[in-house]
Structures are given as C-alpha cells and as structure tokens.
Amino acid sequence: MPQSRQPSGDPADGVYFGLMSGTSMDGVDGVAVRFEAGKPPVVLAEAFVGFAQTLRDVLAGLQQPGHDEIEREALAGNALATRYAVCCHELQRSAGLAPDRVRAIGVHGQTVRHRPERGYTWQINNPALLAELAQIDVIADFRSRDVAAGGQGAPLVPAFHATVFGAPGETRVVCNLGGISNITILPGNGGNDGDVRGFDCGPANALIDAWAHRHLGKPYDDGGKFAARGSVHAPLLDVLLDEPYFAAPPPKSTGRDLFNEAWLDAKLSGFAQLAPEDVQATLTALTAVSIAREIARHAPDCSAVYACGGGARNPALLRALASALADHGVRADVATTQALGVPPQQVEALAFAWLAYRFTARAPGNLASVTGAAGGRVLGALYPR
Ligand SMILES: Nc1ncnc2c1ncn2[C@@H]1O[C@H](COP(=O)(O)OP(=O)(O)O)[C@@H](O)[C@H]1O
Ligand SMILES: [Mg+2]
C-alpha cells in the first residue's frame, strides 16, 4: 500500500515546481514549493500564465479525431512547453531561485484523450523542450503508469490531498472544480491511505465555460453572475443527469471525451425555447447536484466540503453545491481550501510538484484505492536538464 508519509531527512527533500494545465484550457497554474519529509509543504511562489485563444482553439481541435493530428499535436506540445517555461521563469523570478536550486518540475501536460478503458491516456507536452528552456529536470507523463497497472490514471491528486488535508476523527471531502470535477474522500481514521477514495464526478466548468463563451463571448461566467440571473429548469436538469456516467460506481474518471459541447447540444435539442441564463443556471446545478449525489452516496457523514480549482471563485456554484448537499441530506459546510491554509488555485499545481517529489524519492504517487490500479506505482518519466 502506498504511504504518503516519508521518513525524515529524505534525500528527495528540496524545492520543486508544479505545473497544472487542466481541462478548462485557461492556462497553466504553477507553484514553487519546498518539501521536507514530515513537515507541511512551504509555498515559495505561485504564477499563472494564460493561453491565448489561438492556442485554446488548437487544443480544443485536438480533443476530437481530425486531419494531420501528429503534426498539430507536436506543434501544440512545443507551444505548451514554451508557455510552461514562461511560468517556470516567473516562479524563479518571484521566489529568487536559480535553476540549479530546483530539484525538478512536475508537469501535467494537456489532456486531449483520456481512455483508460482502451489502455491509454494522452497529455500533450514537449518535456524535452521544457527541460532545455528551463534547465531544470522535468518529470512528466504521470498518468500512463497507473493506466498500465490497470487503473484509471485519474484522479492523481487524492494522495496529496491525504497528506495535507486529512484530519483524525473527521471525514472531509476535497472537491476540485476545474473543467471536470473530482472529489477526494478523506476518512477520519488517522490517515490510512488505503481508505482514501476519490473519483471524477462529471463536468465542473467545462460546460459552464462553453455556454458563457457562446452567449457572453467570454471564457467563463465571472462570479457565476450569468447563472444567478436564471432559474434551474428541472426537466433539463433531469435529462442532463440521465447520463450513465453519473450513476456508475467508482473507480471512474472522465473528461472532454464525454462532456463536451456536442454532448450538451444533443441534450439541449428539446429545449430550444429556454433562455440562455436558465440553461446556465441549470448547468451550474448539474455540476453541484452531480457532486452532491456522490457525496451523499459515498461520504454521507462528511463534516465539510473544501472546494479548490477555479470553480471555487464562482459563488453561484458554491451556493448551488451547498443547497444540493442539503437536498441530499448531507449536513456538511461548504468552504474553500483557503480555510485549511491553501489557496484554492494552488492545490492542483502543488499536487504535481508533490508527484515530482514522490518520483524523485522513487515512491508511489497513486492510490490504488482511488484509481483501481493493481498497486502503488512510481509515476512519471524523467527528462534530465
Ligand atoms: N472569477 C471566476 N468566476 C467564475 N469562474 C471562474 C472564475 N475564475 C476561474 N473560474 C473558472 O475556473 C476555471 C479554471 O479553473 P482551473 O482550476 O484552472 O481548471 P483546470 O484545472 O481545468 O484548468 C475557468 O475556466 C472558469 O470556469
Ligand atoms: Mg486551469
């Protein structure tokens, strides 16, 4: 069984960078963090480097099969690595670090296909170019080994959540609201990692963003204001929730392969008369209800749900989550991970820095209880500087 805690004075101790660019395709979140065995991580700097609309369009185009994919993917990998390098330089500058002070960069890459049932998951990146540009060791491709061991390859953040957010005597849920939502259930049994569970619940912002883009011409529904102007349309919500993924038992993971605009348009076909703000309110409710249902099923006794990721900046979404939990009989407070001392936008990037730390220690990064893999595995591949 993988253990998240290491003996003190581990040779892997040091400063790591974590870079996360998720399914929202908004840009890359980065952190510089010092890990020392037995101590809480210390964040030295954070940075965000956005993706231009042209890069977003290229990435979105690669989500589906199309012409000349290999060339388009390779060029997108170069463009991403260049943005990742800008993020690393920003981290170095703001933390005052020379490249040789950084043990490694843990970089997720950009998922364009996630098909563990077919034996693969694919993140676009050019880690060799990033190593060249940053002159720092790069550790990439964290998900493939878990898939090779029969796992979902996702989510990978629960092991990190367990090390920083677990509390004895209290069941906590950490809920990441990126393009897709995932939850980690941390039982209050003193940190036995084998009891940690976690899985993707469904879309978090992916559809909300798509709808905001279509009707507001903006990349997201700022503060959830557009949704707040509308009302939830119960028959549409039922049609959306009818997707079998929501009822499937864990382990499970999903992505834009399933929850994309084509999926939404197919579901909306009978609802052409609905006002756009009512659709937005209903999509926000979809995110909230799909999460609340899973918490009611798998962690009905949880005391609090701690949101992280960009969706933690959407008050309409957090309100919808609190009300959906109450509707499902879960008496849990809804807060953000800030209440536990970690800014919500840092959590995922921290997790990938931690995975690089685990790789450096040659320690498992996955939790078999989460992904369904045959066991704990060392995740990632090294591109030396
Ligand atoms: N001020 C805000 N109001 C509403 N939503 C926001 C706000 N800021 C960020 N978001 C949402 O968060 C998303 C980015 O979240 P992030 O955690 O980076 O996701 P991912 O890991 O998928 O990239 C944006 O696409 C948007 O939907
Ligand atoms: Mg993002």
Image (cartoon, rainbow, N blue to C red):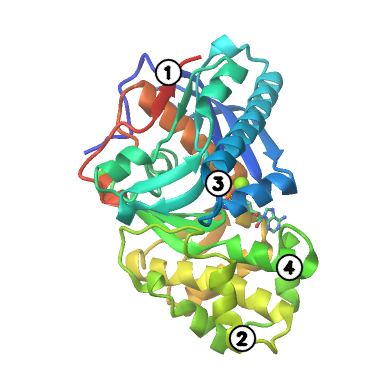
Q: Percent from the top left, x then y, of residue 368?
A: 26, 46
Q: CA distance from mark 4 to mark 2?
A: 19 Å
Q: Which mark is residue 68?
A: 3
Q: CA distance from mark 1 to mark 4?
A: 46 Å
Of tags 1 and 2, which is closer to the observer? Answer: 2
Name the amino acid, label 4. Arg
In the image, residue 379 sits, relative to residue 219, either above or below, namely above
Residue at x 45%, y 26% (from the top left corner): 139
Of tags 3 and 2, which is closer to the observer? Answer: 3
Q: Name the residue beneath numbered marker 4.
A: 214
For numbered disc 2, what is the local secondary structure? loop
> Who is closer to the viewer here, 255 or 166?
255
Q: Earlier in the sequence, mark 3 or mark 2?
A: 3
Q: CA distance from mark 3 to mark 1?
A: 43 Å
Q: CA distance from mark 1 to mark 2?
A: 52 Å
Residue at x 39%, y 27% (from the top left corner): 381
Name the amino acid, label 1. Asp
